[in-house]
Every structure is written in C-alpha cells, then in structure tokens.
Image: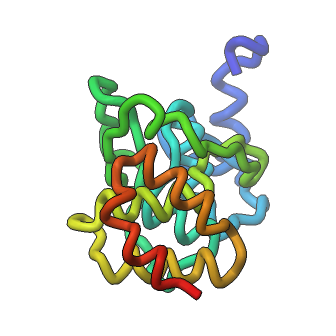
C-alpha cells in the first residue's frame, strides 16, 4: 500500500466500515469476497512466495486423496527461514536440488499465484515421506492418480528417480493395471 502511495490510515478506515477484513499480518481481503476451499493455500503463498505446496495439501488440491489435511504442507530449501506460526498451521519439509524445483506448477487461487507440485511429483514425494504420512496414503495417491489419469506411470517413475525412491516404488508401479 505504501509503495502505491496509499496511507495506512485508509486500511483502518476500510476495516472499521467493514469493507476489508484482516486475515493475517499484512494480509487483507474484501469482506464480501468469496472464500474458496483452498483459501489457506493462497494465504500461505502470499506470506511465503518461494514455498511450494506439497504432500497431503497437494494431494487434496489435485483431488487424489480422501485425506483432509489439518495443516498446509509446504516444501522449502534447506537453510531457509522456518516461518512463524501466524495464520494457517504449517508442516515444513525440506527438499534439495531437482527434488525442490522439478514438477512445480503455478496455479491461481483467489487471484494469488500458488506454487504446487504436479500430481506425478506429489505421488513420488508421498513415497519419499511415507514414514511421515503413511504408506497407505502413498498407495491410495498412486492408485487415484493413475486411475483418474492425472499422470502416467512413466511420469511418476521419472519423478521417483528424481526423488530417489524408484526402487521402493517399482513393485507398486508394476502391480498397477
């Protein structure tokens, strides 16, 4: 707002009139703006623009799971600042190299650019973090992803190599019809 030459007092006036609502530190939205089911992803992306939505949150976004995560799962590079807890609860995982950059897609949610891993990359990540999320969740994601044709077995295998879980996933990939 300051960069646009708008005084902070205007924000306060608009909040008092009920035109704006404060959704977090430095984050405001129109009071009558519709809130989508992915509002928390947009809020996290505004606060942490270099983060990428991953694992359970990405599965829910792509509709390839029955899980409903209580927190937003994000990927950050090692050594980056761990965010403080204001707004949606976060689960942070650290990725390096190609595992951090490959498969990242930009989606628009409530007008905000949100980085989210592709379905194939998300399935490979689920196998990489199967001890955190559970093997049953990873297997369900694999079945749903292929069954809904969100990704091919070849695409999933390529990301499994990048995430270094190709050997772990091989028997499950071979068992698919």
- Which quadrant is the C terminus positioned in? bottom right
What residue is at 51 percent from the left and 51 percent from the top?
A: 159
Q: Quadrant of the N terminus?
A: top right
Q: Nearer the viewer, residue 133 or 82?
A: 133
- In the figure, residue 72 lies in which quadrant? bottom left
Q: Is residue 59 left or right of residue 139?
A: right
What's the residue at 53%, 84% (across, down)?
A: 176
Q: Quadrant of residue 115?
A: top right
The picture places residue 60, in percent across and down from the top left corner, at 55, 71
Is 68 positioned to the left or the right of 15 in the image? left
- Going by the picture, which residue comes out furthest to the left? 131
Residue 145 in view of the camera: yes
> Where's residue 113, x and y in %?
70, 41
The structure's colour scheme is rainbow
Rendered view: 51 above or below 146 = above
- Between 124 and 42, the one lying in front of the other is 124
**Front one among 5 and 98:** 98
* Residue under the image location 76 percent in, 49 percent down: 108
Which residue does the image show at 57% across and 48% down from the upper left? Answer: 43
């Amino acid at each position: 707002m300051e960069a646009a030459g708008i005084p902070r007092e205007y924000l306060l006036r608009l909040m008092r009139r009920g035109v704006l609502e404060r959704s977090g530190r430095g984050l405001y939205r129109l009071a009558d703006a519709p809130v989508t089911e992915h509002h928390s992803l947009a809020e996290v992306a505004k606060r942490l623009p270099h983060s990428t939505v991953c694992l359970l949150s990405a599965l829910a976004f792509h509709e390839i799971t029955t899980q409903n995560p209580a927190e937003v799962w994000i990927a950050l590079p090692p050594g980056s600042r761990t965010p403080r807890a204001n707004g949606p609860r976060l689960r942070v995982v650290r990725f390096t190299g190609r595992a951090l950059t490959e498969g990242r897609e930009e989606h628009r949610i409530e007008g905000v650019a949100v980085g989210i891993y592709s379905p194939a990359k998300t399935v490979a990540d689920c196998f990489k973090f199967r001890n955190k999320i559970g093997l049953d969740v990873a297997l369900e994601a694999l079945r749903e992803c292929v069954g809904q044709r969100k990704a091919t077995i070849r695409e999933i295998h390529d990301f499994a190599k990048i995430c270094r879980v190709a050997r772990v996933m091989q028997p499950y990939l071979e068992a698919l019809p």
